Image (cartoon, rainbow, N blue to C red):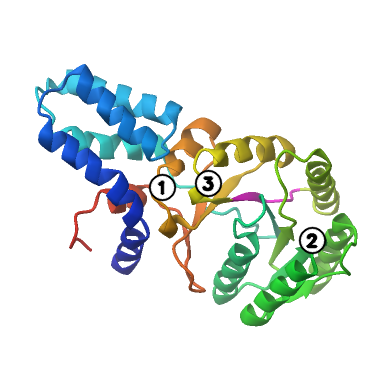
Amino acid sequence: MAAFFSKFKETLNKTRQNFISKVTELVTIRKKLDEEFYEELEDILLQADVGVAATCRLIEGIRQEVKKKKLSDTDGVRDLLQEKMKELLGENAALNLSSDQPTVILFVGVNGVGKTTSIGKLAYRLKNEGREVLLVAADTFRAAAIEQLEIWGDRTDCAVIKQQTGSDPAAVVYDALQAAKKRGVDVVLIDTAGRLHTKYNLMEELRKIKRVITREIPEAPHEVLLVVDAATGQNAIRQAEMFKDTTGVTGVVLTKLDGTAKGGIVLAISEEMGIPVKLVGTGEALDDLKDFDSAEFVDALFAEEGVE
């Protein structure tokens, strides 16, 4: 656990420098809890992509606690912010893995967010837990996408179901589910083509894939995971809205968190969309895909240098 906290802290380094350092500076320089202080704190939160709704909720929560505890200066505000962030994120949401049939997890998202890599890393983890995993190459638009998934299949020792480039993605999924049931597979991970959330035809194709899944396994898909690049900031909210309407997104996989100062998007997604972040990418290694822990996220964000 200590090693993971240290890794998470390192992952959030850019966000911490951009965000928490400014909060610390603000409460150090300003001692008076006046409107100007709250406005500056609001600006810092918005710049970190916490989002308008989450920012308003956090500021209002701090105001209420200040009034309740009769605080007269800014000394306790940093701790209050940390507390209110944990409250906003709420309880952790684990992956929904079925115990009596193949668990089907559908991965969706726009181009270049790291869907296939996230699938490979999750396959590696599930395989290490003793589960039989089947990878499905339903991104049939690009030969390179199929090849990339095959590489992950080799790396993780998982079978890959595929067809030729240009095939009907729903047909690939159908074949994969038939194979999964015959082989007694535990988890089916479905890769889909990266698509702009504004493209109607491509979004309709996702609906078709989901219908095929539900027809073959009524309780499935057990998860629809939207993969989001943390660096996209508020654009992630617009993506989440469209994909949620189309496929009923159940959780978010947040990638490239280590390369951005916009880690506040976690709070924006939680508050504005009501979709839990379930997995987070913390680096390039095979095991750098972790369950998202809201308390650890906030604690790592606020951690002092030298604290492990």
The residue sitting at 89% across, 62% down in the picture is 166
Query: Looking at the rendering, which quadrant does residue 174 occupy?
Result: bottom right
Residue 153 image offset from top left, x and y in percent: 69, 77
Q: Amino acid at mark 3?
A: Thr
Residue that carries the numbered disc 2 in the rendered image: 138
Cα separation, mark 3 vs mark 2, equals 25 Å
Q: Are marks 1 and 3 in contact (CB under 8 Å)?
A: no
Residue 286 image offset from top left, x and y in percent: 52, 74
Q: Nearer the viewer, mark 3 or mark 2?
A: 3
Q: Nearer the viewer, mark 1 or mark 3?
A: 3
Q: Point out the tag, 1 or 2, that comes first from the N-terminus.
A: 2
Q: Is residue 67 above or below residue 169?
A: above
Q: Amino acid at mark 2?
A: Ala
Residue that carries the numbered disc 3 in the rendered image: 232
Q: Point out the tag, 3 or 2, that comes first from the N-terminus.
A: 2
Residue 263 is marked as 1
Magenta-drawn stretch contains 91 = no
Residue 120 image offset from top left, x and y in percent: 62, 69
Of 35 and 106, which appears nearest the observer?
35
Magenta-drawn stretch contains 222 = yes
Of 168 and 37, which appears nearest the observer?
37
Residue 197 image offset from top left, x and y in percent: 70, 41
Q: Which residues are magenta?
A: 219-227
Q: Amino acid at mark 1?
A: Gly
The residue sitting at 23% across, 63% down in the picture is 308
